[in-house]
Amino acid sequence: MAIRYNLWIDPDNTAQHRAVEADLERYFIERFADYPHIRLFGADPYDYDAPFNRLYDVLMARAAEYCERTWRYVASPEQLNRCFFRAVGRSNKFIQDER
């Protein structure tokens, strides 16, 4: 299996990695605007059919494609995941249920 992720191929290119990650955060926040408010942590946080979990899977795939198309950059799963959850934390589209 060949290494594809830019972060692994060129770890010292921090300027590029930071620029891509900042753009990915913006990308996710813009995509969240397309959806109504989404509740986090329902009765079963591991319900893979819950709206948040479905949204996560779809947006991760779209963000990976966007990154390759726009930046010619292959983001690692960890980068995508981190940018997604940073965007969730900054977005007002998510409502957290009381525990």
Image: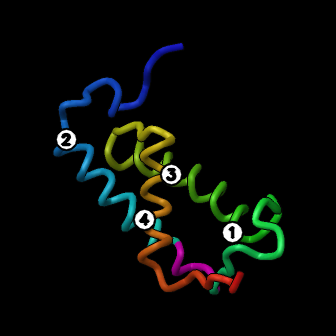
Q: What amino acid does circle 4 point to?
A: Arg
Where in the figure is residue 54, as x and y percent of width and height?
Answer: 72, 62
Q: Which residue is mark 3?
A: 81
Magenta: main secondary structure: loop
Residue in the image at 62% along x and 80% along y: 35
Q: Secondary structure at mark 4?
A: helix
Q: Earlier in the sequence, mark 1 or mark 3?
A: 1
The residue wearing badge 4 is 86
Q: CA distance from mark 4 to mark 2?
A: 18 Å
- Image mark for residue 6: none
Q: Quadrant of the C terminus?
A: bottom right
Mark 4 or mark 1, which is nearer the start of the sequence? Answer: 1
Q: Is residue 82 above or below residue 85?
A: above
Q: Is residue 85 left or right of residue 57?
A: left
Residue 34 included in the magenta stretch of the image = yes
Image quadrant assignment for residue 24 = bottom left
